[in-house]
Amino acid sequence: MNFNLPKSTLLNKFIPKSIFFAKAVVNSKLKADFTDKIQKITWKYKISEETLWINKSDKIQEIEIFEINLKEKIIPKNVLKVIDKTIPYPILYIFTYENDYSYWITLKWEKLWNYYFSDWNENIEFEFNWIDIEKVFEDIIKKFLKNVDTDDKKFDEIIETDNARIFLEKEIEKLKSKIKKEKQFNKKVELNKLLLEQKSKLEQLT
C-alpha cells in the first residue's frame, strides 16, 4: 500500500480509542466494539496546504488517512460512524487484518452521508497530484464508483447519479422480497412489472 506521498504528509501517530469515547456519545456496546474488534488506530497521513502544498477549498480543508488494524476480518461500520462524527475532515481508511486490507471512505457532501469501500486486497491507485484538496477528494471517491460513468462529468452530477443507483438497488431488493412473499397472482404480476421497470432504470444509469 504505497501512496507515493511526500514525507511531509507522514504522521504515523497512534490514536488511543479513548479519545473517541470522550468526544462522542458512545454506549457500552460501541465501547465493546472498539475494544473487541479494533487492535490499533494509526493516523498515517495528513493531506493539507501545509503538508502537500496544494490549496484547500471551502468544502474540503484537509484529508486524513487512517490505518485501522482489526482483530477479525470484519469491518465494524458502527465504529466507523463514531470516528467520522468525531473528526471533521474526510478520512480515507485502510482496514487491515493480518496480510489483508480494504479501503473505505465516507462521503459527507451537502446532506449526503454515503460509505464507499473496496473489496479485500483490491489494488487501487490513488492520485494526490491535483490543483487543490477538493479535487484530491473527488478523485478518491471516483476510484470507488465502479458502476457509474465519471468521465467528463461534474462531481455533483456523478454523486447524484450514484445516489439514484443506490436508491434503485434498494428498491429492487425490496420488490424481490415482496414478490417472494406475495400469494396473490395478480399482485405478483404487478410487482414483477414494477421490478422490470426499476431494473430498466438501473441499466440506463449504469
Image (cartoon, rainbow, N blue to C red):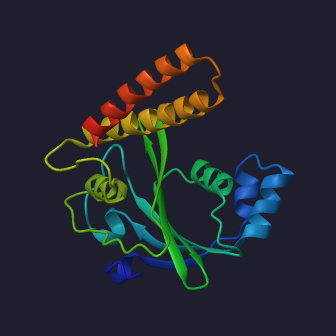
Q: Classify residue 164 by image quadrant.
A: top left
Residue 121, placed above or below residue 18: below
Residue 168, placed above or below residue 75: above
User: Which residue is nearer to you in this view: 145 or 154?
Assistant: 145
Asked whether residue 26 appears in the rendered view, the answer is: yes
The quarter in which the N terminus is drawn is bottom left
Residue drawn at (32%, 50%), measured in percent from left and top?
147
User: Residue 22 at what x, y percent from top left?
Assistant: 75, 55
User: Residue 162 at what x, y percent from top left?
Assistant: 35, 41
Asked whether residue 92 appears in the rendered view, the answer is: no
The quarter in which the C terminus is drawn is top left
From this viewpoint, which residue is outermost toward the top? 186
User: Which residue is nearer to you in this view: 99 or 185?
Assistant: 185
Residue drawn at (53%, 29%), measured in percent from left and top?
175
Residue drawn at (45%, 33%), measured in percent from left and top?
167
Q: In this rendering, would 102 be left or right of 144?
A: right
User: Residue 171 at what x, y percent from top left?
Assistant: 49, 31
Q: In this rendering, would 136 be left or right of 167?
A: left
User: Which residue is nearer to you in this view: 46 or 129?
Assistant: 129
